[in-house]
């Protein structure tokens, strides 16, 4: 550490440049990680908030509940610790008193039975009590300026709803969710209310199991299949593609960071072959010199990553709410350690060179 | 007990299919407190002699002992340790680490070999060599003569038995060269070291107790009276 730190102090500009490169790469990695996580969350937070273990869909739906429809009476054919019906449909809404058309919003309506477990945790206002009411994702308030008691209308339909409550983290396939009753869902989906409960159609049945095991859940209907909630999320349209793209970019960046610092340290080591040779002639071991090169890499990457981390957190404060950036402590810590660890791996490349330096050549 | 002792040491190189003897079988020893010069033209084998003495290369035959202990037959790692504690190297100009201040050059020794060196000695040592006011300067900021004095301080700091100086005056003008060798001679006596200096500058040998000449790998003592 003595050699490492004194050299950094002596060649400030050189090492600042290296730290700068590491900072930029780590900033990008952190930022992409935040975006990837944020975007992933926007696909799934509504589903996560159910705390469910499985979802039951018709087999024909192919794991996708956008097109699935079946009778609500199937609920009786299912044995599970907890079960709830769910209707789901995308829709476009607009705020009342606005006719410009600019404030149209893509949303997802989720129709639920408020006596079952899918009821949202309302952070503001209250739960849905009648068919003309919705509980909305808080992003509609923060980003789109909707407020409690505002009235919204379905574009292309006549139904109007009143926002009676807001909840956090309710997004599905990157659209804000509006919870309403299952009857209201029927009306949005089919344009008219059902006259009889036996005609009630739903998109899915969500189930919970006390043991988190799915094998205790039974279905008395061959047409329906039970999908573990994790698989269901992975099969959300576009979800996996987005996630893999980010994971690929991030892992590549981390590898690039390793190569870049590996090359930097290697070039610096080559420049110092003579100095190291003289040190070895004086009896300073390869081990000590190698350790100090590793320590130096550690210092450089630590500083670079920390500055990158601070810059990321700083930027996150300034970002508009519409950017799906979300930081997650665990990810930040893992990515930081990965960056530092892999930078040190790159520096190990130079250790071989140090061990091979012949002091005899250095002094003659 | 001899500070350093060469017992039938020789060194041969393969040059193509010929074998070149860089150092003919040599017996040589000096005591503590002795200042010895080895002169000779370049390519005569004096660098080979010095690097074998410093354990940087192994002899082809024979053995080098330091303080009566095995040295040249030890492993590289062990030799490195002995070198650190028993041998002080003074090289031409590249001796000092460019990114450490004069004081830090000495502290580096503490970092590697804890125990033997005395931290309070740094200032005394630098004062003795008249470079105490340069202790926070980098090697690039001081003159060649001052750098060599710093190199001497660095070599003496760990209190080694032997000082090996390889052309310590190569980059200096005559006045500075005399000064540096004078200091080297002084410190050899004061600190009771065994010093071997390799040089091609025959004017410097007046400070030495004994002078050897290296010619085609053969080491021969030169009678001082004969050269002056």
Image (cartoon, coloured by chain):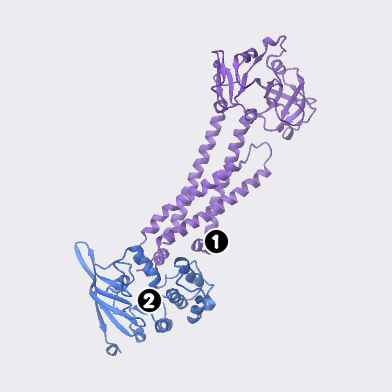
Vertical position of residue A283 compared to residue A165: above or below? below
Is residue A207 found left or right of B197 in the rendered image?
right
Residue at the spot 73% in from the left edge and 26% down from the top edge:
A135
Residue sitting nearer the eye, A66 or A126: A126
Q: Is residue B90 visible?
A: no
Q: Nearest to the eye among marks 1 and 2: give it.
A: 2
- Cα–Cα gap, marks 1 and 2: 38 Å
Drawn colour of chain B?
Answer: blue
- Label 1 neighbour load within 10 Å: few <14, some 14-19, many 20+: few
What residue sits right under mark 1 in the picture?
Answer: A12
Residue sitting nearer the eye, A85 or A65: A85
Q: Chain of mark 1?
A: A
What residue sits right under mark 2 in the picture?
Answer: B161
Q: On the rendered image, what quadrant is the C terminus of chain A found in?
A: bottom left
> How many numbered callouts?
2
Q: Quadrant of residue B198?
A: bottom left
Residue at the spot 33% in from the left edge and 67% down from the top edge:
B56
The numbered mark at residue B213 is none
Q: Quadrant of residue B157?
A: bottom left
Drawn colour of chain A?
Answer: purple
To the question of a shared chain for discs 1 and 2, the answer is: no
Residue at the spot 67% in from the left edge and 24% down from the top edge:
A117
> Is label 1 in a helix, a strand or a loop?
helix
Is residue B183 found left or right of A116 in the rendered image?
left
Vertical position of residue B85 compared to residue A203: above or below? below
Q: Is residue A283 visible?
A: yes
Q: Chain of mark 2?
A: B
């Amino acid at each position: 550490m003595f050699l490492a730190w004194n050299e950094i102090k002596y060649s400030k500009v050189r090492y600042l440049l290296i730290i700068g490169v590491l900072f930029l790469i780590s900033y990008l990695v952190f930022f992409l990680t935040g975006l990837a996580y944020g975007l992933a969350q926007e696909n799934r937070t509504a589903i996560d908030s159910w705390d469910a273990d499985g979802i039951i869909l018709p087999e024909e739906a192919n794991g996708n509940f956008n097109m699935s429809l079946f009778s609500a009476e199937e609920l009786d054919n299912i044995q599970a610790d907890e079960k709830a019906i769910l209707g789901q449909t995308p829709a476009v809404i607009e705020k009342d008193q606005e006719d410009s058309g600019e404030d149209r919003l893509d949303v997802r309506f989720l129709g639920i039975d408020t006596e079952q477990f899918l009821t949202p945790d309302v952070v503001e206002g209250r739960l849905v009590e009648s068919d003309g009411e919705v509980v909305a994702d808080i992003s509609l308030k923060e980003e789109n300026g909707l407020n409690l008691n505002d009235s919204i209308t379905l574009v292309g339909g006549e139904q109007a709803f009143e926002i009676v409550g807001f909840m956090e983290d309710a997004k599905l396939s990157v659209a804000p969710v509006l919870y309403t009753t299952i009857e209201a869902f029927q009306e949005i989906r089919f344009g008219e209310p059902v006259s009889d409960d036996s005609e009630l159609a739903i998109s899915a049945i969500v189930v919970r199991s006390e043991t988190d095991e799915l094998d205790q859940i039974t279905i008395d209907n061959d047409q329906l299949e039970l999908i573990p909630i994790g698989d269901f999320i992975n099969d959300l349209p576009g979800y996996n593609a987005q996630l893999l793209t980010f994971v690929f970019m991030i892992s590549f960046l981390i590898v690039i960071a390793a190569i870049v610092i590996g090359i930097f340290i290697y070039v610096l080591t080559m420049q110092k072959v003579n100095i190291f040779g003289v040190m070895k002639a004086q009896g300073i071991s390869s081990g000590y010199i190698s350790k100090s090169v590793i320590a130096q890499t550690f210092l450089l990457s630590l500083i670079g990553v920390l500055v990158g981390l601070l810059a990321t957190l700083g930027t996150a404060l300034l970002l508009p709410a519409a950017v799906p950036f979300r930081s997650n402590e665990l990810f930040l810590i893992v990515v930081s350690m990965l960056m530092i660890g892999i930078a040190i791996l790159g520096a190990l490349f130079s250790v071989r060179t140090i061990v091979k330096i012949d002091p005899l050549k250095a002094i003659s | 007990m001899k500070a350093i002792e060469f017992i039938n040491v020789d060194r041969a190189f393969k040059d193509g299919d010929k074998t070149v003897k860089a150092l003919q079988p040599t017996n040589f020893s000096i005591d503590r407190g002795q200042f010895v010069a080895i002169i000779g033209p370049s390519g005569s084998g004096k660098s080979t002699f010095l690097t074998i003495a410093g354990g940087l290369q192994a002899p082809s035959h024979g053995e080098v002992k330091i303080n009566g202990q095995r040295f040249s037959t030890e492993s590289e790692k062990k030799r490195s340790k002995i070198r650190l504690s028993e041998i002080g190297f003074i090289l031409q100009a590249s001796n000092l680490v460019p990114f450490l201040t004069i004081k830090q050059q000495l502290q580096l020794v503490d970092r590697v070999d804890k125990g033997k060196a005395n931290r309070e000695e740094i200032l005394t040592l630098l004062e003795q060599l008249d470079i105490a006011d340069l202790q926070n300067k980098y090697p690039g900021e001081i003159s060649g003569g001052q750098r060599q004095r710093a190199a001497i301080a660095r070599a003496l700091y760990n209190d080694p038995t032997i000082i090996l100086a390889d052309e310590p005056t190569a980059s200096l003008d005559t006045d500075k060269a005399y000064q540096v060798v004078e200091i080297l001679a002084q410190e050899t006596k004061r600190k009771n070291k065994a010093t071997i200096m390799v040089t091609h500058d025959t004017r410097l040998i007046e400070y030495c107790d004994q002078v050897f000449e290296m010619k085609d790998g053969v080491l021969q003592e030169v009678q001082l009276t004969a050269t002056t």
